[in-house]
Amino acid sequence: MEAHAGNFYRDCDVTWGGQRTRFLQGGQMLTLSLDQASGSGFRTKKEYLFGRIDMQLKLVPGNSAGTVTTYYLSSQGPTHDEIDYEFLGNLSGNPYTLHTNVFTQGKGNREQQFHLWFDPTKAFHTYSIVWNPRRIIFLVDNIPIREFKNGESIGVPFPTKQPMRVYSSLWNADDWATMGGLVKTDWSKAPFIASFRSFNANACVYSGGRSSCPGRSSARGGNAWKTQALDANGREKLRWVQRNFMIYNYCTDRKRFPRGLPTECTH
Protein backbone atom coordinates (compact mmCIF):
# COMPACT_ATOMS: atom_id res chain seq x y z
CA MET A 1 0.00 0.00 0.00
CA GLU A 2 1.36 3.40 -0.92
CA ALA A 3 0.02 6.58 0.64
CA HIS A 4 2.33 9.54 0.50
CA ALA A 5 2.49 13.00 -0.96
CA GLY A 6 4.25 12.36 -4.22
CA ASN A 7 7.43 13.99 -5.42
CA PHE A 8 7.60 14.33 -9.20
CA TYR A 9 11.38 14.11 -9.25
CA ARG A 10 11.40 10.88 -7.22
CA ASP A 11 8.19 9.25 -8.51
CA CYS A 12 8.02 10.14 -12.21
CA ASP A 13 9.96 9.74 -15.46
CA VAL A 14 9.94 12.18 -18.38
CA THR A 15 8.47 10.24 -21.33
CA TRP A 16 9.01 12.76 -24.13
CA GLY A 17 9.78 16.40 -24.85
CA GLY A 18 13.11 16.47 -22.98
CA GLN A 19 13.80 19.83 -21.36
CA ARG A 20 10.19 20.92 -21.86
CA THR A 21 9.43 19.14 -18.58
CA ARG A 22 10.68 21.18 -15.62
CA PHE A 23 10.86 20.07 -12.00
CA LEU A 24 10.36 22.94 -9.54
CA GLN A 25 10.36 23.37 -5.75
CA GLY A 26 12.49 20.29 -5.21
CA GLY A 27 10.10 18.09 -7.17
CA GLN A 28 6.92 19.32 -5.48
CA MET A 29 5.81 20.97 -8.72
CA LEU A 30 6.26 20.22 -12.41
CA THR A 31 5.53 22.14 -15.60
CA LEU A 32 5.01 20.83 -19.12
CA SER A 33 5.48 23.05 -22.15
CA LEU A 34 4.44 22.90 -25.79
CA ASP A 35 6.08 24.70 -28.70
CA GLN A 36 5.89 24.21 -32.45
CA ALA A 37 8.60 21.54 -32.37
CA SER A 38 7.19 19.34 -29.61
CA GLY A 39 4.98 18.88 -26.59
CA SER A 40 6.01 17.00 -23.45
CA GLY A 41 4.92 14.37 -20.98
CA PHE A 42 5.70 12.28 -17.91
CA ARG A 43 4.52 9.11 -16.20
CA THR A 44 4.84 7.49 -12.81
CA LYS A 45 7.58 4.93 -12.26
CA LYS A 46 5.20 2.66 -10.36
CA GLU A 47 2.11 0.83 -11.58
CA TYR A 48 -1.07 0.69 -9.53
CA LEU A 49 -3.98 -1.75 -9.34
CA PHE A 50 -6.78 0.20 -7.63
CA GLY A 51 -6.38 3.37 -5.63
CA ARG A 52 -7.12 7.04 -5.33
CA ILE A 53 -4.99 9.39 -7.42
CA ASP A 54 -5.06 13.16 -6.80
CA MET A 55 -3.32 15.80 -8.88
CA GLN A 56 -3.57 19.58 -8.85
CA LEU A 57 -3.44 21.22 -12.28
CA LYS A 58 -3.33 24.78 -13.52
CA LEU A 59 -4.05 24.81 -17.24
CA VAL A 60 -2.60 26.80 -20.15
CA PRO A 61 -3.94 30.37 -19.80
CA GLY A 62 -5.11 32.81 -22.48
CA ASN A 63 -5.54 31.50 -26.02
CA SER A 64 -5.09 27.77 -25.50
CA ALA A 65 -6.99 26.74 -28.66
CA GLY A 66 -5.61 23.58 -30.25
CA THR A 67 -3.80 22.41 -27.11
CA VAL A 68 -4.69 19.37 -25.03
CA THR A 69 -3.50 18.75 -21.47
CA THR A 70 -3.98 15.16 -20.34
CA TYR A 71 -3.93 13.34 -17.00
CA TYR A 72 -4.90 9.68 -17.03
CA LEU A 73 -4.31 6.15 -15.81
CA SER A 74 -3.41 3.56 -18.45
CA SER A 75 -2.11 0.03 -18.84
CA GLN A 76 -0.23 -1.16 -21.92
CA GLY A 77 -1.05 -3.23 -24.99
CA PRO A 78 -3.89 -3.59 -27.52
CA THR A 79 -6.48 -4.52 -24.85
CA HIS A 80 -5.42 -1.77 -22.46
CA ASP A 81 -7.55 -0.17 -19.78
CA GLU A 82 -7.56 3.60 -19.34
CA ILE A 83 -9.23 6.23 -17.14
CA ASP A 84 -8.99 9.61 -18.79
CA TYR A 85 -9.05 13.33 -18.09
CA GLU A 86 -8.31 15.52 -21.13
CA PHE A 87 -8.54 19.31 -21.05
CA LEU A 88 -9.28 20.78 -24.47
CA GLY A 89 -8.08 24.35 -24.88
CA ASN A 90 -10.08 27.23 -26.31
CA LEU A 91 -9.89 30.81 -27.49
CA SER A 92 -9.38 33.42 -24.76
CA GLY A 93 -12.58 33.99 -22.81
CA ASN A 94 -14.17 30.71 -23.92
CA PRO A 95 -14.32 27.80 -21.48
CA TYR A 96 -12.10 24.75 -21.51
CA THR A 97 -13.80 21.44 -22.27
CA LEU A 98 -13.08 18.70 -19.74
CA HIS A 99 -13.24 15.43 -21.65
CA THR A 100 -13.50 12.13 -19.72
CA ASN A 101 -13.39 8.58 -21.01
CA VAL A 102 -13.07 5.00 -19.74
CA PHE A 103 -11.40 2.29 -21.83
CA THR A 104 -11.83 -1.39 -20.95
CA GLN A 105 -10.13 -4.18 -22.88
CA GLY A 106 -8.97 -1.67 -25.49
CA LYS A 107 -12.45 -0.23 -26.12
CA GLY A 108 -13.36 3.36 -25.26
CA ASN A 109 -16.17 5.41 -26.84
CA ARG A 110 -17.49 6.32 -23.38
CA GLU A 111 -17.00 10.08 -23.53
CA GLN A 112 -18.62 12.53 -21.17
CA GLN A 113 -17.65 16.19 -21.52
CA PHE A 114 -18.08 19.11 -19.16
CA HIS A 115 -17.47 22.80 -18.76
CA LEU A 116 -16.12 23.70 -15.33
CA TRP A 117 -17.74 26.04 -12.80
CA PHE A 118 -14.46 27.99 -12.44
CA ASP A 119 -11.58 29.20 -14.62
CA PRO A 120 -9.05 26.31 -14.51
CA THR A 121 -6.22 28.60 -15.68
CA LYS A 122 -6.34 31.07 -12.77
CA ALA A 123 -5.43 28.73 -9.91
CA PHE A 124 -4.67 25.12 -9.10
CA HIS A 125 -7.62 22.75 -8.75
CA THR A 126 -7.62 19.11 -7.67
CA TYR A 127 -8.63 16.40 -10.15
CA SER A 128 -9.04 12.94 -8.63
CA ILE A 129 -9.67 9.39 -9.78
CA VAL A 130 -11.08 6.84 -7.33
CA TRP A 131 -10.73 3.32 -8.78
CA ASN A 132 -11.87 0.35 -6.75
CA PRO A 133 -13.28 -3.05 -7.78
CA ARG A 134 -16.85 -1.74 -7.86
CA ARG A 135 -16.64 1.65 -9.50
CA ILE A 136 -14.60 4.53 -10.90
CA ILE A 137 -15.39 8.04 -9.65
CA PHE A 138 -14.04 11.21 -11.26
CA LEU A 139 -13.88 14.15 -8.82
CA VAL A 140 -13.03 17.83 -9.31
CA ASP A 141 -12.17 19.61 -6.05
CA ASN A 142 -13.71 16.54 -4.39
CA ILE A 143 -17.05 17.06 -6.19
CA PRO A 144 -18.05 13.95 -8.16
CA ILE A 145 -18.62 14.65 -11.86
CA ARG A 146 -18.84 11.09 -13.18
CA GLU A 147 -19.27 7.53 -11.95
CA PHE A 148 -18.59 4.38 -13.98
CA LYS A 149 -19.79 1.24 -12.19
CA ASN A 150 -18.49 -2.28 -12.56
CA GLY A 151 -20.94 -3.85 -15.03
CA GLU A 152 -19.26 -7.23 -15.48
CA SER A 153 -22.48 -8.91 -14.33
CA ILE A 154 -24.25 -7.44 -17.40
CA GLY A 155 -21.36 -8.20 -19.77
CA VAL A 156 -19.55 -4.84 -19.65
CA PRO A 157 -15.80 -5.21 -18.99
CA PHE A 158 -14.30 -3.29 -16.06
CA PRO A 159 -10.63 -2.60 -15.27
CA THR A 160 -9.79 -5.16 -12.57
CA LYS A 161 -6.69 -7.02 -13.73
CA GLN A 162 -4.30 -4.71 -15.58
CA PRO A 163 -2.07 -2.43 -13.47
CA MET A 164 -1.87 1.16 -14.68
CA ARG A 165 0.58 4.03 -14.51
CA VAL A 166 -0.37 7.69 -14.17
CA TYR A 167 0.46 9.70 -17.30
CA SER A 168 0.29 13.40 -18.16
CA SER A 169 1.07 15.29 -21.33
CA LEU A 170 0.65 18.60 -23.14
CA TRP A 171 0.40 18.37 -26.90
CA ASN A 172 -0.95 19.96 -30.06
CA ALA A 173 -4.23 18.48 -31.29
CA ASP A 174 -5.52 21.34 -33.42
CA ASP A 175 -6.89 18.87 -35.98
CA TRP A 176 -9.75 18.13 -33.53
CA ALA A 177 -9.41 19.71 -30.09
CA THR A 178 -11.11 23.09 -30.50
CA MET A 179 -14.46 23.42 -32.26
CA GLY A 180 -13.82 20.14 -34.06
CA GLY A 181 -10.53 21.37 -35.49
CA LEU A 182 -11.82 24.65 -36.92
CA VAL A 183 -9.65 26.75 -34.58
CA LYS A 184 -5.92 26.17 -34.94
CA THR A 185 -3.07 26.65 -32.47
CA ASP A 186 -1.65 30.20 -32.48
CA TRP A 187 2.08 29.49 -32.30
CA SER A 188 2.86 33.17 -31.71
CA LYS A 189 1.61 32.50 -28.15
CA ALA A 190 4.06 29.60 -27.58
CA PRO A 191 5.44 28.20 -25.38
CA PHE A 192 2.21 27.00 -23.79
CA ILE A 193 2.70 25.88 -20.18
CA ALA A 194 0.58 23.69 -17.88
CA SER A 195 1.49 23.26 -14.20
CA PHE A 196 1.13 20.25 -11.90
CA ARG A 197 1.55 19.91 -8.13
CA SER A 198 0.35 17.95 -5.07
CA PHE A 199 0.48 14.56 -6.78
CA ASN A 200 -0.75 11.90 -4.37
CA ALA A 201 -1.12 8.16 -4.97
CA ASN A 202 -3.08 6.45 -2.21
CA ALA A 203 -3.01 3.17 -4.07
CA CYS A 204 -2.01 -0.47 -4.32
CA VAL A 205 1.40 -0.70 -5.98
CA TYR A 206 1.68 -3.62 -8.43
CA SER A 207 5.13 -5.11 -8.94
CA GLY A 208 6.45 -8.51 -9.94
CA GLY A 209 2.94 -9.87 -10.43
CA ARG A 210 1.84 -8.94 -6.90
CA SER A 211 -0.14 -6.15 -5.28
CA SER A 212 1.09 -4.32 -2.19
CA CYS A 213 -2.43 -4.52 -0.74
CA PRO A 214 -3.32 -7.58 1.34
CA GLY A 215 -6.45 -9.36 0.17
CA ARG A 216 -8.59 -8.36 3.14
CA SER A 217 -7.00 -5.06 4.06
CA SER A 218 -9.14 -2.54 5.90
CA ALA A 219 -10.96 0.31 4.17
CA ARG A 220 -10.65 2.61 7.17
CA GLY A 221 -9.06 6.04 7.34
CA GLY A 222 -6.87 6.82 4.33
CA ASN A 223 -8.03 3.61 2.66
CA ALA A 224 -11.67 4.73 2.36
CA TRP A 225 -11.30 4.68 -1.44
CA LYS A 226 -11.36 0.86 -1.36
CA THR A 227 -15.10 0.81 -0.78
CA GLN A 228 -15.90 4.41 -1.70
CA ALA A 229 -19.33 5.00 -3.21
CA LEU A 230 -21.55 8.03 -3.59
CA ASP A 231 -23.76 8.74 -0.60
CA ALA A 232 -26.92 10.85 -0.89
CA ASN A 233 -24.90 14.08 -0.74
CA GLY A 234 -22.48 12.81 -3.39
CA ARG A 235 -25.31 11.76 -5.69
CA GLU A 236 -26.88 15.20 -5.32
CA LYS A 237 -23.59 16.89 -6.24
CA LEU A 238 -23.17 14.56 -9.21
CA ARG A 239 -26.67 15.46 -10.44
CA TRP A 240 -25.88 19.17 -9.99
CA VAL A 241 -22.75 18.87 -12.15
CA GLN A 242 -24.40 16.75 -14.81
CA ARG A 243 -27.47 18.99 -14.98
CA ASN A 244 -25.57 22.28 -15.20
CA PHE A 245 -22.14 21.56 -16.69
CA MET A 246 -22.28 18.40 -18.81
CA ILE A 247 -22.13 19.25 -22.52
CA TYR A 248 -21.88 15.74 -24.00
CA ASN A 249 -22.89 12.28 -22.79
CA TYR A 250 -22.36 9.20 -24.95
CA CYS A 251 -25.25 7.54 -23.13
CA THR A 252 -27.75 9.93 -24.74
CA ASP A 253 -26.22 10.01 -28.25
CA ARG A 254 -28.66 7.85 -30.20
CA LYS A 255 -27.36 9.10 -33.56
CA ARG A 256 -23.96 7.68 -32.72
CA PHE A 257 -25.41 4.34 -31.57
CA PRO A 258 -28.31 3.72 -33.98
CA ARG A 259 -28.46 0.03 -33.05
CA GLY A 260 -28.99 0.86 -29.40
CA LEU A 261 -27.12 2.61 -26.63
CA PRO A 262 -24.24 0.78 -24.91
CA THR A 263 -25.37 -1.79 -22.34
CA GLU A 264 -24.15 0.20 -19.31
CA CYS A 265 -26.28 3.17 -20.41
CA THR A 266 -29.56 1.31 -20.19
CA HIS A 267 -29.03 -0.44 -16.82
Image (cartoon, rainbow, N blue to C red):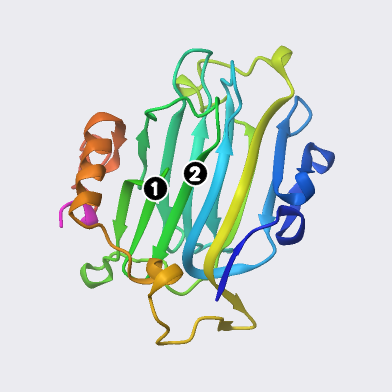
Q: Is residue 54 above or below residue 172?
A: below
SS for tag 2? strand
Closest to the observer: 78 or 251? Answer: 251
User: Which of the pair 81/51 is nearer the observer?
Assistant: 51
Is 238 drawn above or below residue 114 in the view shown? below
Quarter of the view holding residue 207: bottom right
Q: Identify the residue shown where x is 58% and y is 31%.
A: 59
Q: Which residue is mark 2?
A: 126
| Cβ–Cβ under 8 Å for marks 2 and 1 | yes
Crowding at mark 2 (Cα within 10 Å: few <14, some 14-19, many 20+): some
264 relative position to 108: left or right: left
Instruction: Name the residue carrying label 1.
Output: 142
In this view, the residue in front, 199 or 49, is 199
Give the quarter of the figure containing the C terminus.
Answer: bottom left
The CA span between labels 2 and 1 is 7 Å
Residue 145 location, x and y as percent? 33, 44
- Neighbor class of circle 1 (other Cα within 10 Å; few <14, some 14-19, many 20+) is some
Residue 78 location, quadrant: bottom right
Q: In percent of the image, x 23 and y 56: which residue is there?
A: 264
Magenta highlight range: 263-267
Q: Amino acid at mark 1?
A: Asn
Where residue 109 appears, as percent x and y from the top left, is 37, 47
Classify the position of the N terminus by image quarter: bottom right
